[in-house]
Image (cartoon, rainbow, N blue to C red):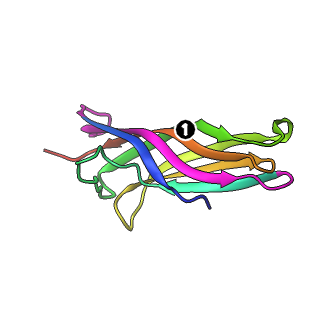
């Protein structure tokens, strides 16, 4: 499992909306997750990165109840890869990304499944975007 080093340039926005199905808030979180996932000597290595997308600096981390979260979705893209060796046998992949409400913390948790191929190859940053549709009430 890859370990998160830090989040660069965290950004978030909260917008009031009207629906669907009683939702009244839309939250968007963006930034760059910094970590290290290195490839094996031969073949592909599957890896997972898990993190909570932070609010902007100076803001308190949002905690949701189960009833508040209608839906959460996420996207990610490769933001930095590295290979000082033979690049003809290297590969980098984001296989999936999921954002879901965590019942223990109340946070939205992002889980990224990825892969790295090749000795000395490394995946070191991904850019992410998380959107949460919620119902907070008046």
Residue occupying image coordinates x 34% and y 38% = 11
Q: Nearer the viewer, residue 13 or 87?
A: 87
Q: Nearer the viewer, residue 137 or 48?
A: 48
* Mark 1, other Cα within 10 Å: few <14 / some 14–19 / many ≥20: many
Range of the magenta residues?
15-43
Q: Is residue 60 above or below residue 79?
A: below
Q: Is residue 91 left or right of residue 69?
A: right
Q: Nearer the viewer, residue 69 or 9?
A: 9
Q: Is residue 71 above or below residue 101?
A: above
Residue 27: tell me if it is visible.
Answer: no
Q: Is residue 103 above or below residue 100?
A: below
Image quadrant where one finds the C terminus:
top left
Element type at mark 1: strand
Q: Can you give x and y, in whole percent of width and height, for residue 122 in the image?
A: 69, 47
Asked if residue 83 lies in the magenta stretch, the reply is no
Q: Which residue is mark 1?
A: 76
Residue occupying image coordinates x 85% and y 51% = 43
Q: Is residue 65 above or below residue 16?
A: below
Q: Can you give x and y, in whole percent of width and height, for residue 50 in the image?
A: 52, 56
Asked if residue 18 lies in the magenta stretch, the reply is yes
Q: Is residue 95 left or right of residue 33?
A: right
Residue occupying image coordinates x 80% and y 41% = 90
Residue 44: tell me if it is visible.
Answer: yes
Q: Is residue 15 left or right of residue 33?
A: left
**Residue reaching furthest to the front:** 84
């Amino acid at each position: 499992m890859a370990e998160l080093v830090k989040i660069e340039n965290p950004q978030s926005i909260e917008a009031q909306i009207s629906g669907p199905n009683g939702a009244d808030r839309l939250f968007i979180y963006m930034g760059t997750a910094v970590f290290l996932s290195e490839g094996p000597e031969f073949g592909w290595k599957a890896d997972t990165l898990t993190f909570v997308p932070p609010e902007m600096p100076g803001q308190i981390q949002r905690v949701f109840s189960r009833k508040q979260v209608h839906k959460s979705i996420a996207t990610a893209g490769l933001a930095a890869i590295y290979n000082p060796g033979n690049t003809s046998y290297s590969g980098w992949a984001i296989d999936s990304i999921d954002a879901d409400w965590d019942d223990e913390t109340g946070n939205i948790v992002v889980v990224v499944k990825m892969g790295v191929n090749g000795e000395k190859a490394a995946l070191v940053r991904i850019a992410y975007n998380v959107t949460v549709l919620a119902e907070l009430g008046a």
